[in-house]
Image (cartoon, rainbow, N blue to C red):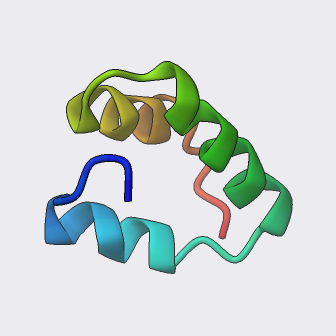
Amino acid sequence: MRFLSVPETLVETLNNIEDLTRLKQLLLETIRVNFVAEFETLIQDNSSGEN
């Protein structure tokens, strides 16, 4: 809701994350980023290869 529009690839990435703790952490991270691109970078940087 914050960014109104996000790339479909980001939506797919988030939909594939099954770790509830990680999803909660990412939700909190949306508060501190200013742009969708920053959030995408966070997801890539923190990617552990696990769902």
> From the viewer's perspective, is 23 left or right of 47?
right
Q: Is residue 37 above or below residue 5?
A: above
Front in this rendered view, residue 3 or 26? 3
Q: Is residue 38 above or below residue 30?
A: above
Q: Residue at x 70, y 77 (%)?
A: 18
Q: Residue at x 51, y 37 (%)?
A: 30
Which picture quadrant has residue 39?
top left
The image position of residue 31, as x and y in percent, is 55, 30
The image position of residue 35, as x and y in percent, is 25, 28
Quarter of the rendering occupied by the C terminus? bottom right
Quarter of the rendering occupied by the N terminus? bottom left
Which picture quadrant has residue 49?
bottom right
The image position of residue 2, as x and y in percent, is 37, 48
Q: Residue furthest right?
A: 21
Q: Residue at x 69, y 59 (%)?
A: 23
Q: Is residue 44 above or below residue 15?
A: above
Q: Residue at x 21, y 67 (%)?
A: 9
> From the viewer's perspective, is 31 left or right of 34?
right
